[in-house]
Image (spheres, coloured by chain):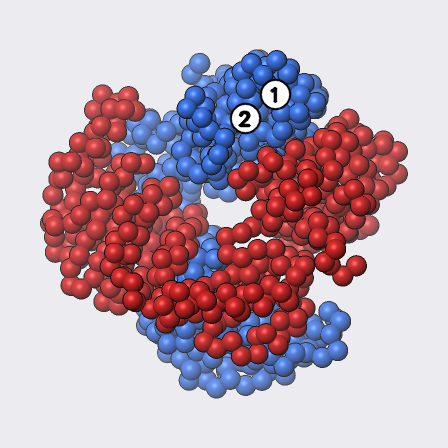
Chain colours: A red, B blue
Amino acid sequence: MDVEIVAIGNELLLGETVDTNSAYAARRLAKIGARVSRVTIVGDDRERMRKALAEARERSRWVITTGGLGPTQDDVTRQVVAELFDAPLEIDADVLADVEERFRRFGYAKMPESNLSQAEVPRGARVIPNRHGTAPGLVVEGGGSTFFVLPGVPAEMRALLEEGVLPALVAASGDAVPVVRSRVVHTAGIGESALAERLQDALADTSPIEVAFLPDLGMVDVRLTLAGYSRVEADRRLDVLAGEIIRRSTPWFYGIDDETLPQAIGGSLVERGWKVAVAESMTSGELGAELTSPAGSSAWFVGGIMAYANEAKEALLGVPRETLAHHGAVSEETCRAMLAGARKALRAEVACAVTGIAGPAGGSEEKPVGLVWIGVETPAGAQVRKLDLPGGRKEVRRRATAATLALLWRQLRPAESER
Amino acid sequence: MDVEIVAIGNELLLGETVDTNSAYAARRLAKIGARVSRVTIVGDDRERMRKALAEARERSRWVITTGGLGPTQDDVTRQVVAELFDAPLEIDADVLADVEERFRRFGYAKMPESNLSQAEVPRGARVIPNRHGTAPGLVVEGGGSTFFVLPGVPAEMRALLEEGVLPALVAASGDAVPVVRSRVVHTAGIGESALAERLQDALADTSPIEVAFLPDLGMVDVRLTLAGYSRVEADRRLDVLAGEIIRRSTPWFYGIDDETLPQAIGGSLVERGWKVAVAESMTSGELGAELTSPAGSSAWFVGGIMAYANEAKEALLGVPRETLAHHGAVSEETCRAMLAGARKALRAEVACAVTGIAGPAGGSEEKPVGLVWIGVETPAGAQVRKLDLPGGRKEVRRRATAATLALLWRQLRPAESER
């Protein structure tokens, strides 16, 4: 079951907004066994939009459009779709009542004139009510194609996808239809080549399963995809191969599919009855935010200290003034003192620390931008690593955060790892 | 000057990777006055890729492709482009030497066989050397079109775009060519409708400048775009309108184009000689990470405390045990105590605090998921706000962070705001 997506908006073509809607929709569609065959991004230009939508209708049974349903003049998706399907726009009384009601609730005496267009519906189209915004979704059918016309605001798009699009596709697909299924095996702390070597025998002939390595930020994912089988048979085959990959990639393996490294870390901490605290200089909260991204992280995350200024390192983490003066804030010694200070101040069994130079300023010949010390301390002792990270400020911070999570993961699984 | 982008990779169509490359390229292209006319995402399927590339060549003088240049079997962009331009692949001796050298530097005795394909170049194509990875970029011309074939790894794509694509486009464009220019005016803390009302008169007739409102997370951007004039004339016209919008949107206006809210906050703090500290419960570092995203933030950001557990709120922020017991961790009283505690512990003139329930668990009838208290304290006093945020865990945290930054911004500009 192939679905095509057309994302609409000048802001996407200008690069001011990254189109995250399409990736989100693709992930949700994959869950019901549907596959995105193509994504097209076009601007708010009527003629170009019309061409892209006509091409999509030509190619695909199912098309999702996002964006261009707002109240302003540059929002013309509704009109272009109506013309494409030769269905004149008409005011829908129910939608109009909804939009007006929404404005009343927000304290407006009356709805602005410009919002009237949001109550227009192509004749014969079905409305997907929007409880999160003023623009409803539309389902327009004709010429062997079905268009799901959704707003571009991510929260609204996601809600209407769940409520109006996925149920319709599931209903249309039936059970016997061959589906596309995939599994992603996640690893942290091992390079792509080294992982590929370990998996070589298992991946010698995986046909009809497609295998792809996806490296990012020092983590490597292995994606398995299988098309053309029933859901049950596809899952059975994928599970066998995934199991073999997991066996060979332990202790670097940390999860499959939606499982994240912070979740795996949390699970391992709970098993041991430990809690973790963080001490962050350069990353200033990124590590704490990452660690607490999973639901339920309060069971194993105590808190942390962003010790950006040296005074904060002294006052809150007890880093000795002499250590800072003698070795500097970016040094193995400071990193170790931050670890000890975080464990003590937050009464945690485990601590992580990051101190480094993200740039663009602040580097020197001896300590260039990208120099980072990360560390993890558990009751079994402290491990610190010196990193020399490429990229700009943002990338250095992201890579340091990811490397610290990977180091923490390895320290929580010492029994299985090669020491 | 229109440029079309084709992004290649199954991981993009499966939604496992968000295509950030296209938005990045679009922003860089906009800087030289070029405009992306369309983005297409296709998978690693040969036939579908061939179709998409052929269509792009038909439509566009300039095409950038990203992805599919890796060493594995699913990387077929090189072959598909070679076939499309009828240019057989040949081993390029220089590229081969580069790739082999790269493997030697990383400690390999010899290059893996699979990497040989990365040294293949379509006959007649120009090579853009890649110092960040093994796959070089390619410039392939024919049939009135030029294809820039780039790797998909973001760091490599960005480097080759700068080194091989932008200079070629600038050289081809000449000076007299009309360009597309834009300005984005950023505001925080005012809704789209209220802002539109304030700007109404200024935006009554802006033609030929296009105006669009882009709301996100409680912030509203106003984008002005002008096509068809010389760079100097376009900039002059845009500056006049942008100036008028800035005048009318003060004190909510905080910057234009690449300027960010944390930068504006930093500038305002430096002006006053103040420093800021944060106390975060629910967001656990997101606010600190956001505030320190600009270079040079150490001039005005001291540090912060992630007080996730109640014990951390007591020990590190001095929130009285009775306050937590009586009012709960998510309450106005705790938020105010966190503000006072952060100012004291970090010796900062200004503090921000966030405490709330991000969910999915932890909510109650009285205090549902999405309930958040945010606060800002300056020498002029404390301001706290109760928020009722929609969305899942991640969205609640992001919105709370954004709302706190907006509140901080408003507290730093009290003289100009309506009080």
First in sequence: mark 2 or mark 1? 1
> With B272 as the anchor, is A120 left or right in this view?
left
Q: Residues within 10 Å of mark 2 (few under 14, many from 20)?
A: many
The quadrant of the image that shows the N terminus of chain B is: bottom left
Q: For the residue marked with disc 2, what is the amino acid?
A: Thr
Residue A7 placement (x, y as % from top left): 34, 54
Look at the numbered disc 1 and give the secondary structure of its residue. Answer: helix
In the image, residue B269 sits, relative to residue A210, either above or below, namely above
Look at the numbered disc 2 and give the secondary structure of its residue. Answer: strand
Identify the residue under disc 1: B338
Q: For the residue marked with disc 1, what is the amino acid?
A: Met
Instruction: Please state the chain letter of the residue tagged with numbered disc 1 in the rendered image.
Output: B
**Looking at the image, which residue is at 65% across and 33% down?**
A302
Identify the residue under disc 2: B355
Nearer to us in this view, B84 or A261: A261
Quadrant of res B276 = top right
Residue B378 placement (x, y as % from top left): 59, 17
**Looking at the image, which residue is at 11% across and 43% down?**
A90
Res. B86 in view:
yes
